């Protein structure tokens, strides 16, 4: 490691043996170091030799270093000094030695170095941070005197992933439950919670500190039992900050005040509140602390103690407020002269687009009369108090309130959000009991905000399918009990890069060429669901022209087709990048062998079988599926005349982490195979019968984090004989 004084003589080059940290970056921003070639004239002040065999933390580019090769790291002394790294290096190579003087200055120094180099997030890094907290917990006096200068100068210095590891290790020391820790650590949890909210201001891929009522309650409970824990939590939040905090189902009451009184919100710029109660109580806490650093508050489906939310929101000093109203109540409005002008304007906009401009395109299904000619009552449902609509319309600036609404009649329905009763967002359009011949695609606010389309009990042709591809924002398309009819006039299918999800449920295909061309036009299709109860509703079986489908972007496939007889098993190698695959329904012995044997499913991570029969014809069917993490057989599956282990090559290494089995007989060969699954942490079996030594069975399951069975079909007395009184409560 070379410590240099300036960067004037440094130029970029693709040279893996050189890595430079040159940013003048006292706040340690997360900037990934680039590779450079260094001029011979650069002033190297000192050089530090790192022995990677003894330095157990892993650098980001360490895997590129070949054996016996030197790797040069160049670091600006304005970012890190030689003696600071020397101190850090001694701690790492001496691990797990207790650190005597873990004061605030040394803590900041150590975490600053971790953040500079962005060491790999692995168990070694977690264990090292745990030792730091152990040193603080068992020698708290070093931390009692607050170093105001260092804290103020270094506030906000750490990346969120470093801070998250730190708080998790602190909570783990005080025996906070693993379920709670997993929720804080799991970044995908926030993403899942926000999946149904398609708004521009929501980015589920950002890093959040996740908190809910259970997490806060468990922390507070431990704080009341152990005063030292309360002090150490306060230490943590006075040093670490999170730019974005996500609250889920928090019931904001006075008892939570002392938790919020930690320096929890210092450095926070954005707060998410999802399905929380008494939100205005929490906001009042923020006001008391005068936290001007908070720029954005997002309130989603929350409850307030105040009745006048709009007046309350106008008192905010926050730069941006995004408020999505929940659907806890609604009122129905009929299209008549007594309607509020704002509501009447909404109805007229939708009616003009759908009926005036398309009155010759929409017919009643199986009839020759247009939908426009039918007597129909238009109903507008608004999840908001009508008396406050004008006040809501007066909101200005970046205060945005999204009100869920529904406009419907016999044939059409629109579910959408109205922003301040001025703009339409997240529109879902539903066609029901219609024969759609064409669609007028005139540019409009409504057309540009249609994200989802449902076609229910309706008939469409190739012309309408081609128009669907032209919707500028459409992401999700659903066919349910509908029919794609034959059309003489040939349609042009343009490439579509917007539609990501297609659900085709019990719908009949008469024009196979048309539908195949439509599918091949969906270049960015990620999710495909096929539910078929008859042959002519299955696009992969009923295709008489054997048209190839090129769905190379597909990641998730749910294929549930009622097996009849004959050649009803499709060829699935047309999906080379698929990650998740669910197969059903009632397929016979030999099906999974035909689909998976000797095929390339290298990208497959999750595989589910529903109602599939597994038998001797399926031997070695899954031998090449070595990368699967999750394998599930539902209870309706049946495994007979074959051992579970015989589906695989027992000499291969498999990546299974989560395994679910149906009613099954477990043999010694199965147990040996399961015991070799070194990544397996969860096993669920509905029913099983043991044909081997029961002690070996329990030894196999002992090391897994989670194992569950619904009904153990073995002799209870035999279990007592093998395992003794400890298992007398075993079912």
Image (cartoon, rainbow, N blue to C red):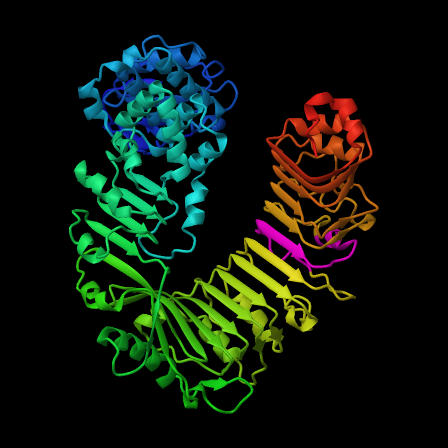
In depth, the one of 116 and 408 nearer the eye is 408
* Residue 391, image x, y percentages: 18, 64
Determine if the magenta segment contains residue 576. Answer: yes
Q: Is residue 215 left or right of residue 285?
A: right
**Rendered residue at 59%/31% (across/down):** 705
* Residue drawn 30% across the image and 32% down it: 259
* Residue range highlighted in magenta: 571-595
Residue 245 sits in which quadrant? top left
- Identified at 43% across, 53% down, the residue is 195
Q: Main secondary structure of the magenta part?
A: loop
Above or below for 230 versus 278: above
- Percent position of residue 585, x then y: 69, 59
At which x and y percent is residue 278? 29, 47
Q: Decide: is 157 above or below 418.
A: above
Residue 467 located left or right of residue 303: right
Is 110 in front, or is 215? 215
Which residue is at the far top?
Answer: 100
């Amino acid at each position: 490691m070379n410590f240099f004084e300036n960067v004037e003589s440094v130029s970029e080059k693709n040279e893996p043996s050189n890595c430079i940290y040159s940013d003048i970056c006292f706040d340690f921003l997360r900037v990934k170091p680039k590779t450079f070639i260094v001029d011979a004239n650069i002033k190297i002040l000192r050089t530090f030799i790192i022995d990677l065999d003894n330095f157990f933390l892993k650098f980001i580019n360490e895997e590129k270093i070949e054996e016996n090769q030197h790797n040069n790291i160049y670091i600006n002394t304005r970012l890190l000094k030689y003696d600071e790294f020397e101190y850090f290096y001694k701690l790492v190579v001496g691990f797990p030695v207790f650190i005597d003087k873990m004061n605030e200055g040394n803590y900041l120094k150590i975490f600053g170095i971790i953040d500079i180099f962005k060491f790999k997030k692995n168990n070694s890094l977690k264990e090292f941070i745990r030792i730091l907290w152990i040193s603080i917990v068992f020698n708290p006096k070093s931390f009692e005197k607050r170093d105001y200068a260092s804290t103020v100068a270094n506030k906000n210095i750490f990346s969120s992933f470093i801070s998250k590891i730190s708080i998790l290790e602190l909570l783990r020391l005080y025996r906070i439950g693993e379920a709670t820790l997993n929720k804080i650590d799991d970044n995908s949890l926030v993403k899942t919670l926000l999946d149904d909210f398609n708004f521009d201001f929501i980015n589920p891929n950002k890093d959040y500190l996740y908190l809910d009522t259970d997490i806060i309650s468990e922390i507070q409970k431990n704080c009341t039992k152990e005063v030292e824990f309360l002090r150490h939590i306060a230490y943590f939040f006075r040093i670490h900050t999170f730019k974005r905090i996500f609250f889920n189902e928090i019931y904001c009451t006075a008892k939570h005040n002392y938790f919020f009184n930690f320096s929890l919100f210092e450095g926070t710029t954005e707060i998410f509140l999802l399905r929380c109660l008494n939100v205005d109580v929490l906001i009042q806490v923020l006001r008391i602390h005068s936290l001007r650093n908070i720029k954005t508050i997002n309130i989603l489906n929350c409850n307030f103690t105040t009745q006048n939310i709009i007046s309350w929101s106008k008192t905010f000093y926050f730069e941006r407020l995004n408020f999505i109203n929940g659907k806890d109540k609604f009122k129905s409005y009929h299209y008549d002269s007594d309607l509020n002008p704002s509501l009447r304007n909404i109805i007229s906009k939708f009616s003009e687009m759908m009926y005036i401009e398309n009155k010759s395109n929409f017919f009643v299904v199986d009839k020759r009369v247009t939908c426009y000619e039918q007597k129909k009552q238009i109903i507008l449902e608004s999840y908001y108090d009508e008396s406050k609509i004008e006040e809501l319309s007066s909101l200005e600036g970046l205060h945005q309130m999204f009100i869920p609404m529904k406009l419907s009649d016999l044939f059409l329905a629109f579910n959408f959000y109205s922003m301040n009763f001025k703009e339409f967002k997240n529109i879902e359009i539903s066609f029901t009991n219609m024969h759609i011949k064409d669609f007028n695609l005139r540019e409009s606010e409504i057309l540009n905000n249609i994200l989802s389309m449902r076609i229910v009990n309706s008939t469409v042709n190739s012309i309408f399918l081609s128009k669907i591809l032209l919707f500028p924002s459409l992401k999700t398309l659903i066919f349910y009990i509908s029919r794609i009819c034959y059309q003489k006039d040939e349609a042009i299918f343009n490439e579509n890069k917007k539609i990501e999800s297609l659900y085709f449920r019990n719908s009949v295909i008469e024009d196979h060429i048309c539908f195949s061309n439509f599918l091949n036009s969906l270049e960015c299709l990620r999710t495909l669901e096929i539910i078929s109860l008859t042959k002519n509703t299955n696009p992969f079986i009923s295709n008489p022209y054997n048209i190839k489908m090129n769905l190379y972007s597909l990641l998730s496939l749910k294929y549930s087709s009622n097996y009849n007889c004959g050649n009803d098993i499709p060829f699935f190698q047309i999906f080379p990048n698929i990650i998740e695959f669910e197969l059903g329904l009632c397929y016979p012995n030999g099906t999974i062998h035909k689909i998976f044997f000797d095929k390339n499913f290298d990208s497959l991570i999750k595989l589910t079988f529903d109602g599939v029969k597994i038998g001797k014809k399926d031997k070695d069917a899954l031998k090449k599926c070595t990368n699967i993490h999750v394998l599930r057989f539902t209870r309706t599956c049946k495994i007979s005349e074959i051992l579970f282990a015989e589906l695989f090559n027992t000499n291969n290494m498999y990546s299974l982490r989560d395994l679910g089995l149906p009613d099954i007989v477990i043999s010694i060969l199965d147990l040996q195979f399961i015991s070799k699954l070194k990544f397996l942490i969860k096993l669920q079996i509905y029913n099983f019968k043991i044909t081997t030594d029961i002690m070996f069975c329990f030894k196999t399951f002992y090391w897994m984090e989670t194992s569950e069975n619904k009904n153990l079909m073995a002799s209870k007395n035999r279990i007592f004989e093998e395992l003794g009184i400890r298992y007398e409560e075993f079912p």
